[in-house]
Image (cartoon, rainbow, N blue to C red):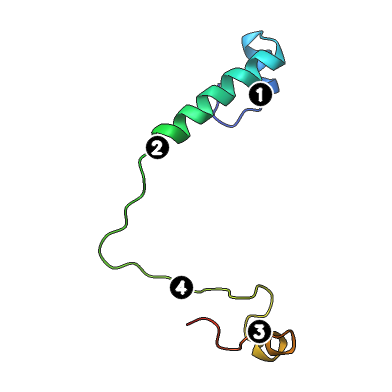
Amino acid sequence: MGLDLSNEQIAKELDLDPDDAQRMTTVLREGVVQWKPEVKLSGEVECDEVYVVAGHKGHPEAVRKKGGSADAGG
């Protein structure tokens, strides 16, 4: 059984009711999220780009027309 199966595929392969498979996978997914360690960044961290207003990259005049600041990034 692969990791990229839908709940319906899992139910079919394990001969389970689809609702039971849904409940089981929900419990598993919530458990994974609950026990996943928090990401801690260290050392030098680089950010390539920041979008202050999506869709206006390189066009500050479009942001100004809508009442935003052209240099609102920092």
The furthest residue to the bottom: 61
Residue depicted at x 44% and y 33%: 34
Please give the residue where the numbered disc 1 appears in the rendered image. 7
Instruction: State how far apart marks 3 and 4 are (Cα).
Output: 22 Å
Image coords of residue 46 (percent x, y):
37, 70
Please give the residue where the numbered disc 4 appears in the rendered image. 48
Please give the residue where the numbered disc 2 appears in the rendered image. 36
Q: Closer to the camera: disc 2 or disc 3?
A: 3
Pick whichever of labels 2 and 3 is earlier in the sequence. 2
Instruction: State how far apart marks 3 and 1 are (Cα).
Output: 45 Å
Image coords of residue 71 (percent x, y):
55, 88
Q: Is residue 48 left or right of residue 58?
A: left
Q: Quadrant of residue 66?
A: bottom right
Instruction: State how far apart marks 4 and 1 are (Cα).
Output: 37 Å
Residue type for callout 4: Asp
Please give the residue where the numbered disc 3 appears in the rendered image. 68
Q: Closer to the camera: disc 1 or disc 2?
A: 2
Pick whichever of labels 1 and 2 is earlier in the sequence. 1
Instruction: State how far apart marks 1 and 2 are (Cα).
Output: 22 Å
Pick whichever of labels 3 and 4 is earlier in the sequence. 4
Image coords of residue 64 (percent x, y):
69, 89
Neighbourhood count class around disc 1 (C-alpha, 10 Å): few under 14, some 14–19, many 20 upward? some
